[in-house]
Image (cartoon, rainbow, N blue to C red):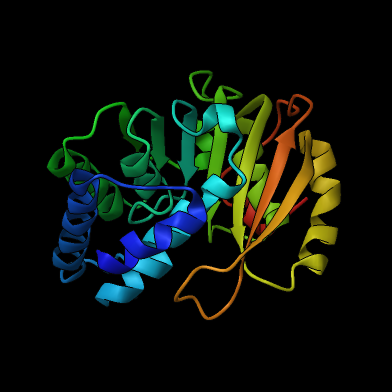
Amino acid sequence: MDLLKRSLACLGLSLTSEQLEDFHLYYQELVIWNQRFNLTRIIEYREVQTRHFLDSLSARLVLPEEFKSQGRIIDVGAGAGFPGLPLKIACPDMNLTMVESVRKKSAFLNHLISALRLSKIRVCADRAENLAHDQLHRETYDVVLARGVAPLRSLAELTIPFCHIGGILIAYKGTHLQEEIHEALPALTTLGGEIVEEKRVNINGLKNYRTLIAIRKVRPTPPQYPRRSGMPRKRPL
């Protein structure tokens, strides 16, 4: 994990030797499970450190100070654990919920939680469209994370309902976003969110810039959203 260790300063982070060992174990388990299940196409050692671990940790650059250590966080579409699990390893006191409907991926996440001996973390093997109507989850989270889930206008419907008023959605996006943002503005207004920051990030080892979009929840989300499974993607607001 030398590359990861050298690159942390730009994110305002330093990790203990035990945390670096956890990242190494994460990598080992990812490789083993990826031989049986298609968890990720990025598996080379250096690329995992940059394109998965460092990229995930970049959310700290827009994460409100009060949520950096002990916030209540939900990662929607967690996949193989990115971005939520790297943030959890780096900030062990945060409360993390990971939403992943694909069973083989949620099984991997539960295995990894056990292997890393993590606490204050759980996996919900369900769709965001269903879970966001559960009163245990609706409008209860400080921060919602979403990396590579859907275009912003669809993503907003899948994620903003989880935020409480004053909470924040952090969407991981690429470059050339102005059209995507413009198309999403009506959906954000409907769902109670407004963009408060667009942060361009250059991670060592990434060919292209990452853009982090921070969206603040300023009004309650109407109770009919999100719509039933599949609708946010098929017929975006």
Q: Position of residue 122 (x, y in %)?
A: 32, 32
Give me the residue at 50% from left, 58% from top.
10
Which residue is at 32% across, 60% downward?
5
Tell me: residue 36, above or below residue 194. Answer: below
Asked if residue 128 is positioned above or below residue 138 in the image, the reply reads below
Q: Nearer the viewer, residue 1 or 171?
A: 1
Query: Which residue is the extreme one toward the bottom?
Result: 207
Horizontally, residue 202 falls left or right of residue 98, namely right
Left or right of 110 on screen, residue 64: right
Q: Is residue 92 at least partly visible in the picture?
A: yes
Count numbered badges in the picture.
0
Residue 231 x/y as whole percent = 64, 50
Tell me the quarter of the picture where residue 233 sits.
Answer: bottom right
71 up-or-down from 32: above or below: above
Q: Nearer the viewer, residue 60 or 97?
A: 60
* Residue 168 picture location, percent across and down: 65, 36
Q: Does residue 100 appear in the picture of this structure?
A: no
Dividing the picture into quadrants, the one containing residue 192 is top right
The residue under the point 51% across, 25% down is 137
Side of 220 where 47 appears, left or right: left
In the image, what residue occupies the spot 13% across and 44% down?
Answer: 115
What is the residue that sits farthest to the top in this orientation? Answer: 135
Quarter of the picture holding the N terminus: bottom left
Query: Taking 117 as reference, is 201 above or below it?
Result: below
